[in-house]
Amino acid sequence: MFAAENGLKGDPRLQAISRAIRVVPDFPKPGIMFQDITTLLLDHKAFKDTVDIFVDRYRDMDVSVVAGVEARGFMFGPAIALAIGAKFVPLRKPRKLPGEVIAESYVLEYGTDCLEMHVGAVEPGERAIVIDDLVATGGTLSAAIKLLERVGAEVVECACVIGLPEVKDCCRIKGKPLYILVEPRLSDECC
Amino acid sequence: MASQGGQDPRLAKIASSIRVIPDFPKPGIMFQDITTLLLNPEAFKDTIDLFVERYREQNISVVAGVEARGFIFGPPIALAIGAKFVPMRKPNKLPGEVISEEYSLEYGTDTMEMHVGAVQPGDRALIVDDLIATGGTLCAAIKLIERVGAEVVECACAIELPELKGRDRLGDKPLFVLVSSDI
């Protein structure tokens, strides 16, 4: 669900967060309007508001695990985890995590990729959220959910700063609710 | 080290929550795994608090974090001290116009990139990574920040491997670490 339709309608923080995200045309390839969150990270108030909105949502939901998807999920997840007293668990590209891992592959536009998590990081029965900067097709988040469920954790929700319109209608990834702050902008000219 | 003599009691817990993985990424290397620190909310919070306490009064306007583990420690510090967070990334990840700095690896070289415009002349910067080994990565980060006219106030890492003499490689830039490991 989008935050604006779920308790945060008209919240001025959301407009400022949206405006702080830069649109970079034709990256990584022609036709893609890339939603660049690095400019959000340069705006201390907007970055803090982003984290605060997620913290306010999850602090009373008994979440013990915040799983962040490499690499931009690492920029948001740890601050949320620290504020709600949860563990932070990095979900990484292959061969980055040094210990024993479990792996889940997922489909890309061309080919496949793989997400790994350390064995033992998450215990059965833990309540987890998955965080990434943006959700497009949901492929990465689906792989993240599978990893957490394979070790017996319960995925409470997936949280992203930006959600493409496709997910607005479906609203769930593998049956798990999706919580999104803003939609992508088409360019930097309009607001 | 964070302190000499009277050691901050938080440091022992931080040190003990770091896992050592032998022979990763290759035989002979004792890898310092901070993911177990991140699984201990108290120890992770203490880690961030120790950095925040040191830097909150130092007028730091930029926290630059080195991909990828610098992205885990940098943003919470930046948020707590009111600074911008600037990711320093591997090539072709940042979407906008970048400046690049090449640095040496054991075999070959790698490149670090930063967005043009992220750091301004006169900014006071802190560079954060999980660990300093030879100091090659941090040196590249220092160069990028200085090339745009900003000042590197200090480099901050959770762990130092002093035998690799990374500290010397940073030249006149100070280094602050929490834990020192001889393996």
Image (cartoon, grey):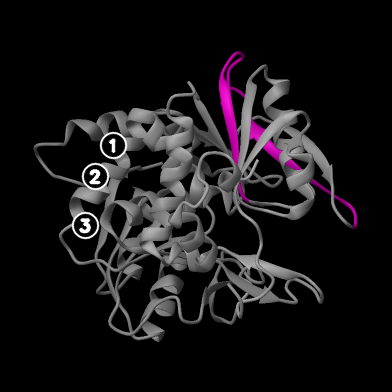
Q: Do the residues labelled 2 and 1 touch (CB within 8 Å)?
A: yes
Residue ranking furthest to the left: B6
Asked which secondary structure carries label 2, the reply is helix
Q: Residue B55 carries which label?
A: 3
Residue, disc 2:
B50
Residue type beneath disc 3:
Tyr
Mark 3 residue crowding within 10 angstroms, few (<14) / some (14–19) / many (20+): some
Magenta-colored stretch includes residue A175:
no
Work out which quarter of the rendered image holds the C terminus of chain B and state it: top left
Identify the chain of the residue marked 3, using the numbered disc in the image: B
Observer-nearest residue: A69 or A84?
A84
Residue B132 in sight from this viewpoint: no
Q: Give the range drawn in magenta.
A: A110-133
Place residue B151 in its image quadrant: bottom left
| 10 Å crowding of disc 2: few (<14), some (14-19), many (20+) | some
Marks 3 and 1 belong to one chain: yes
Q: Which residue is drawn at 9% across and 40% down?
A: B5
Where is residue A125 shown, x and y percent of the image? 59, 13
In this rendered view, identify the residue nearer to me: B154 or A74.
Answer: A74
| Of the image marks 2 and 3, the number of the one nearer the N terminus | 2
Q: Which residue lies furthest to the top in this view?
A: A125
Q: Name the residue under label 1.
A: B46
Give whichever of B77, A16 is nearer the camera: A16
The residues tagged by marks 2 and 3 sit, at their Cα atoms, a distance apart of 9 Å
Q: Residue at x 71, y 45 (%)?
A: A94
Q: Which residue lies furthest to the right in this view?
A: A110
Q: Which amino acid does label 2 sit on?
A: Leu
Q: Is residue B86 above or below residue A104?
A: below
Instruction: Tell me which corner region of the image, top left, top right, bottom left or bottom right, holds residue A154.
Output: top right
Q: What residue type is labelled 1?
A: Asp
Q: In this view, does A157 lie above or below A19?
A: above
Which percent across, then down, holds residue A25? 71, 77
